[in-house]
Amino acid sequence: MRLQSSLVIAARIAFAIGIAGTGALVAQDGTQQNVAEPAPLQRERLRGSLRDAGGNAIEGANIEAWYAPVAAEAVLFGIEDVVTTKTDARGRFELSLLRGAVYSIVGYWKDAEGVARQSVVTTSTGDRLVTLEPAEELTSGAEVDVVVSGDRAAYGILGQLRATVFCDGANWRRFATKPIDGDEPVRFEVPFTGDRGRVKIVVEDDRGPIHVNTMFLRKQTKVWQSRVNLPKGPKVDVHVTDKDGKAIAGAQIQCPQSVWGSSPWRTHAVTDDEGHASITTIEEFDKQWTIRVRAPGYVEAYGFRSSGQGHLCGKPCTEWAADKPIVFTLEAGEPLVGTVLDENGKGLPGIPVAMSYDVSLMVQPNSYRGLGSTAMLATTDEEGKYRFGGVGKPDSLRLMAALPPEILARLSKNSDVVPASWIELDASRAGSKSEVPTLDFSKAAIRVFSIRKPGGTPARGAAIVSLTDHSDSVKEAIERAPRADKRGRVALFVFAEPKSNPLINLFKRSSARSEFAILEGEGWKELRSSDLATEPGKEDEPIPLELEPFTERNVLVVDGDGQPLAGVTSNIGGSSWSGSGAMIDFARAANAIGLAQKSDDQGRMRLWSIDVPNMQHRISFHAQSKTNRNQVTLQLPSPGEEWTVTIAK
């Protein structure tokens, strides 16, 4: 049975639903156990053009498109495809992109004066024309200096220290990797930068990442410095035991390079036969620090301190004697083990699976401390199994699998549609040997959704995002989510499970999790179970979804004399709301995008938002720099009102 779509979609989705009937099965029905046949990688042609601000074609510009899905933090799935070309005399170009993948695309060149220029980094798939627009405020040809200082031996550097610079956005683009031999700066030439001039610098040794720094580059400065200061004191002793007081040997003592944010966790010491270890990576023991202890067969435990307060192994603790060891008591726990099965029900090797969670929820339950999140990657073995060490609170974890292009092509070879390659597993079922997170493509089908704009026309480029307590921001989710093709169609893998309600997810749905369709500037829709239900016998037909329109507000920005002001930016300067739930979270995040706009040459801008009862926003307006104008913050008015914003000098 063939599906009626020719979709190209994104690489990332957290979506798995049950269906009535068999639908359009990806695999055999189970009566034949044929060996899976290889399928050629499916690519589509993307055509585009590049012109300058005056509309003139730019010849000989470098065009790059890259696909490299990111799990979280400094964890990449290890899947990468980079395609390059140059524009012709008419400023046109063609690229061959993998179907089912969202690429980041950019053009960069030097103008007649030899000044480095670039286009805005665009997110796209291979089924449409793309016009790259010259960047107005983004830098191009920037230089980044990476400096590492501190006692490397005390910190526990293993092997060669090195730095890698990435362009950050929907995908990570690796520019270069260089060794760091001393304290002198190591310079990187960055040919272009990502959205808002954003790059990531990852410093690592043979043990893995030490530091991840995100930098927002601006065109005013061409050389930026990323500095890593390694903690160098004092010496702290750690003692690790089980609940009976028995010493645990071989436990890993881990600390981040920086207490706050997203610094990677790394092992600095391992306990001896008596459960003791010493570390020298805590710089201010009397102020703030975080330690994680991991051991095979036990649930990981955390110790945390800030301003005299803290938690140790989930319990409040305020007394920390520097001359006594910190005692960690670990509880026995099973590892998290899951399986990925192919279309014949056999183990599928080589599938990267990422696990991530908010560190704060592990350190101090029900209290946010700003410790960021952590992630780790496992790859399925020959039996299709992946394994993670013992972790607490499985309902707070997030598991994501990404299908390599060759496997995605094989699983969708009998379909005209390429479904999303990013699939999220519900980790809340972890911890039970009978209910480990399993991805079984012998029970998989490809479902197609036909998304329409509020007026009924195809919603080309509409994204389907899934939000949980631990999901990325909506902006990042939209960047990496499945996108509707020119007919407004998008496809997803769905799974059926025997002896289950056919309209219930294969993986237990969380009350805090919900799926949304969104097309920026046009409309949105929350996907409920009623939207996902289909009539018997019509499983192969697209499920229709019509977006609800955003609320629009037209704004005129003028100066004190009533003259239009161009280039004024708006954003949410403050909010108030009551209520809770996924809809509130989605509306807040979507409004942060829709209420951040820029006035045109006539001083006009169009703001869009989701108006939820009991939610109010204050909007700030900023004139361009060096104009000596004040910032203005106003309450968002009711729809339909004339709104003129005056920014005087």
Image (cartoon, helix red, strand yellow):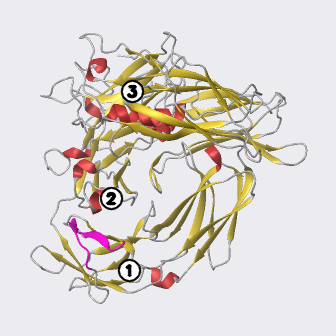
Give the residue at mark 3: 612
Instruction: Name the residue carrying label 2.
Output: 360
Foreground label between 1 and 3? 3
> Callout 1, which amino acid?
Phe
Residue 120 visible in this rendered orientation of the protein: yes
Q: What residue type is labelled 2?
A: Ser
Inter-mark Cα distance, 1 to 3: 46 Å
Q: Where is residue 76 in the image (x, y as percent from the top left)?
A: 47, 52
Nearer the viewer's eye, disc 3 or disc 2? 3
Q: Is mark 2 on a helix, strand or loop?
A: helix
Q: Tag 3 or tag 1, which sits nearer the N-term?
A: 1
* Left or right, 272 with reference to 638: left
Of all residues shown, which one is farthest toward the bottom? Answer: 323
Left or right relative to 246: residue 534: right
Residue 510: x percent and y percent? Answer: 24, 37
What is the crowding at mark 1: few (fewer than 14 residues within 10 Å), some, or many (at least 20)?
Answer: some
Q: Which region of the structure is painted magenta?
A: 307-319
Q: What's the CA distance linking mark 3 and mark 2?
A: 29 Å
Q: Where is residue 292 in the image (x, y as percent from the top left)?
A: 31, 69
- As measured in the structure, the alpha-carbon distance from the residue carrying label 2 to the one carrying label 1 is 19 Å
Q: Earlier in the sequence, mark 2 or mark 1?
A: 1
Quarter of the picture containing the N terminus is top left
- Quarter of the image with the C terminus is top right
Vertical arrangement, residue 582 with respect to residue 392, above or below: above
Q: Is residue 277 above or below residue 64?
A: below
Q: Residue at x 62, y 78 (%)?
A: 181
Q: Nearer the viewer, residue 417 or 112?
A: 112
> Residue 52's image quarter?
top right
Task: Kindly identify which residue carries mark 1.
Answer: 285
